[in-house]
Amino acid sequence: MTHASHDTDAGRFGSFGGCFVPEVLRPALEEIAEAWERYGDDADFREELAHYGRTYVGRPTPLFEATNLTEHLGGARIFVKLEGLAHTGAHKINNALGQALLAKRMGKTRVIAETGAGQHGVATATAAAALGLECEVFMGAVDARRQVPNRFWMECMGATVRQVHEGTATLKDAVNAAMRHWTERIEDTHYLLGSALGPHPYPTMVRTFQAVIGRELREQLAERGVDRPHTIVACVGGGSNAIGVFHEFVGDADVRLVGVEAGGRGTGRGDNAVRMSGDGRPGIVQAYRSLFLLDDDGQVLPTHSVSAGLDYPGIGPELAHLGTTGRIDFASATDDETLAAVRLLAQKEGILPALESAHAVAHATKLAPDLTHDDALVVNLSGRGDKDLFIMAEALDRDAWRAFLRDELARMDADDEANA
Ligand SMILES: Cc1ncc(COP(=O)(O)O)c(C=O)c1O
């Protein structure tokens, strides 16, 4: 999906965004754009989504003042927005439910999705189960191995998980496979894209569904007597949790917004997913124009991150625009800094962040000491860390984890033998 055969001016963010899809997908995108135009502002649609938010997702998610971490670092008062306490453990459910409700309004009976960390896949499988839609999730084979628990839960909820073996067998390959599949089932299928990227109207639609995070944050800060945060930090894969929390504050010029990308194992080519604060180049990939990690021939480069949700080679067009115009700052955190941040937040506050979200924590620990106690520093904790047990356990205590796995296997083999 790297070639454009159609271009419209819709959904532009400066020179980024747009809709560059092959002819075969044009009717599908037009259908979604029409539905979005019709229902995006519709009072009944919004109330139904808000109702699910309150009664199913658990919104509003808490805003927690991390006083131990604040004391430990000195400087800013640190707050964490606990999106990990949303049903399914991450912000992804906000968008999945929104699009699933829209799909029903469009008369679709199936949803398909791509997933990296598996959080969006789980959120989609969840929304599909709750709303009675069939669900198929495309997942890179590498991610399916890294995020076994989420693959397991998706299947448990009745979704079919298709492993994708092409390319680097990660998120971008899953997007390609989902788009390819979509061309064959447009009539009954909605492609439930998981981040604020892709062709118009996805970036606007996904941002709108995620903007609930920033709206709640403003209210919750006001309840604590904080008129405006000094800085808001969020991790950036495709960019949906970041634009979701930032959107409300983009017009407040004095609020600093910082997106944190995956610094991976270093600055070498293929060792990270740093687009904005690194080598991102303009290009059209997967039907939208933005900044991507590309080689000199314009081919998408491989990426690496300890977190499966941040190793995407592109970034949503609105963030690319707000980054190049200087409204949003970008930084990165390495795998090692991220693992240290998981441990720090766990030990100081008893909160286990998702590896993706821990990138934001890692960067916040660098910013906090330079601020004062009058400054509120908010970290958007996009997800919780349960899904990362396999990665964290190996990183924290490889020997104990290996012994546990070996024992479990031996126990299962013994059970099988006994039952044979
Ligand atoms: C917990 C969590 N945070 C962040 C992300 C990155 O996505 P986005 O940049 O769209 O928020 C993911 C992606 O899977 C995720 O699972």
Image (cartoon, grey):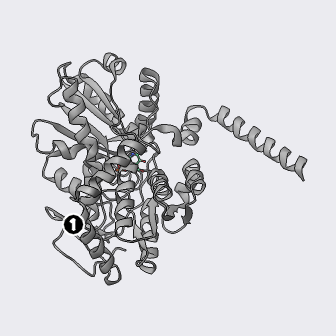
Q: Residue at x 41, y 71 (%)?
A: 108
Q: Is residue 106 above or below residue 75?
A: below
Q: Is residue 403 left or right of residue 46?
A: right
Give the answer, above or below, for where 273 lies relative to 29. Answer: above
Q: Is residue 267 visible?
A: no
Residue ranking furthest to the bottom: 23
Q: Circle 1 is placed at which residue position?
A: 37
- Asked if 67 appears above or below 55 in the picture, the reply is above
In this rendered view, identify the residue nearer to me: 112 or 129.
129
Residue 222 in which image quadrant? top left
At mark 1, the secondary structure is helix
Q: Is mark 1 within 8 Å of ligand 1?
A: no
Residue at the (42%, 37%) spot, across then down = 85
Kindly identify the residue that appears in the image at 42 percent across and 27 percent down.
345
Residue 400, above or below 141: above
Q: Amino acid at mark 1?
A: Glu
Where residue 95 sits in the image (x, y, percent)?
A: 35, 54
Q: Position of residue 261 (x, y in %)?
A: 33, 46
Residue 394 at what x, y percent from top left? 59, 38
Left or right of 91: which side holds 278?
left
Is 96 positioned to the left or the right of 280 in the image? Answer: right
Is residue 116 toward the left or the right of residue 31 in the image? Answer: right
Q: Residue furthest top?
A: 71
Q: Quick check: can you spot residue 184?
A: yes
Give the image location of residue 386, x and y in percent: 52, 39
